[in-house]
Image (spheres, rainbow, N blue to C red):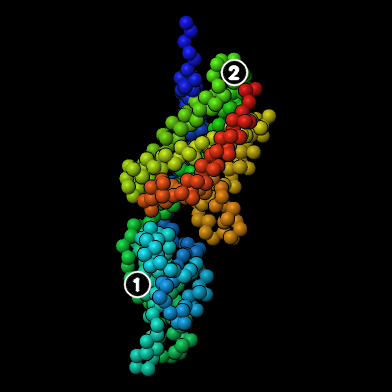
Amino acid sequence: MSKKYSQLKAALVLSRASLTATLRSPTSVVFALLFPVIFVTVFGAMVDNTAVKVKIVLSPHSDTGNPMYTAIRQVKIFDLSQGRDSTAMLADLKKGRIAGILYLHPPVIINGVPRFQTDLLGSSAVADKLPLVQAALQEVATRVNREVLPDQPLAASVRMVHVPGRVYRQIDFILPGQLGFSLLMAGVFGSAFLLFNLRHTLVLKRIYVTPIKGSFLLLGEMISRLLFQVICFIIITALGYFAFHFTLVNGIFTFLEMLLLSVLGLVIFMGIGFIISGLIRNESSIAPVANTLTVPQILLCGLFFPIDNYPVWLRSFCEMLPLTFFVDGLRKIAFEGLHIWQIPVQLAGLLVWAIIIAVLSVKLFKWE
């Protein structure tokens, strides 16, 4: 009696062969590991105090008739919004989502001179932005002084109130972006070129005569890429954590949740590679097509700099891209300490992209 053919065992054998080929490929190692390590090292060693826009929230009880309010609204580097929930505002401040909270006191008359007191609540989570905010507010106070009481004692002043929070470093922004870069490049380029070469050299045609199903062939390739990316993920994260103090709020549990989210990202980016390999007939066309799909995401999805300063229409487009969902999810898990089930927007976005791309990958897969 003949043994039943094991699709899973065949997929594991193919994944082992694919992993060996990937580890021996200089291109895969360079794009998936070497480039991200270089970027993490360079940006992790940088000190960034050059933010173009900083988010400031106005306390709900502030006096908007205060001349300081009008002057602060004119500061171009401030993205000023009106706060409503004090508890939520403090939580955002401690997590580094906003750069400060302003409270504008009603004017007080002392010895016939009006005083316009402004309180700035800051946090160590935005320590890199506080000097910029304080300098801008001091300039505002000086301007108000000149307008309200020229050649008189100071009418406006700024007092700093410190709120405890996590220390936010450049590496906390850069490292999740580089993990996304590594996953994107390895998934798209690695899968596209590998499947095309297997098809071109008739390896897939020979596999076709075996009992293995196409879905299990894709599963084997996915397992191979997953193991390779786990190696890259561990190296990049360990470098950021031990060399540049990358924030992992919940330690090993944060690391594992980031890794779990990476599996979902891998499904999407490998699927893009599978789709490219199924549509392209000429190997020389793979790189231009892959670059057309990856380069815009690298530039628009906040890998190297925030997307907050983009125009609203462009930012709305960027927020719908799979790499944006993935990188934003990693940053919320790593620095803010959220669990994977506490990022429903990013998780839902990735799941929708994963389903769409998985269906297209299976439909467009060709043996020859």
Residue at far bottom of view: 112
Marks 1 and 2 sit apart, C-alpha to C-alpha, by 70 Å
Q: Where's residue 283, x and y in %?
A: 65, 30
- Between 362 and 102, the one lying in front of the other is 362
Do we see residue 295 in this rendering?
Answer: yes
- Between 319 and 193, the one lying in front of the other is 319
Residue at far right of view: 281
Q: Residue at x 59, y 23 (%)?
A: 198
Residue at far top of view: 1
Q: Residue at x 41, y 46 (%)?
A: 341
- Between 337 and 343, the one lying in front of the other is 343
Q: Where's residue 46, x and y in %?
A: 42, 54
Residue 160's disc number? 1
Quick check: marks 1 and 2 in contact, CB under 8 Å?
Answer: no
Tag 2 residue: 208
Q: Residue at x 59, y 53 (%)?
A: 317
Question: Considering the numbered disc 1 on the image, is that residue within a helix, a strand or a loop?
Answer: strand
Q: Residue at x 57, y 56 (%)?
A: 315
Dot 2, how many residues are within 10 Å of its Cα: few (below 14), some (14-19), or many (20+)? some
The disc labelled 2 sits on which kind of residue? Tyr
Above or below: residue 68 compared with residue 304: below
Q: Give the mark nearer the N terminus: 1 vs 2.
A: 1
Tally the marks.
2
Q: Where's residue 167, x and y in %?
A: 35, 57
- Between 104 and 154, the one lying in front of the other is 104
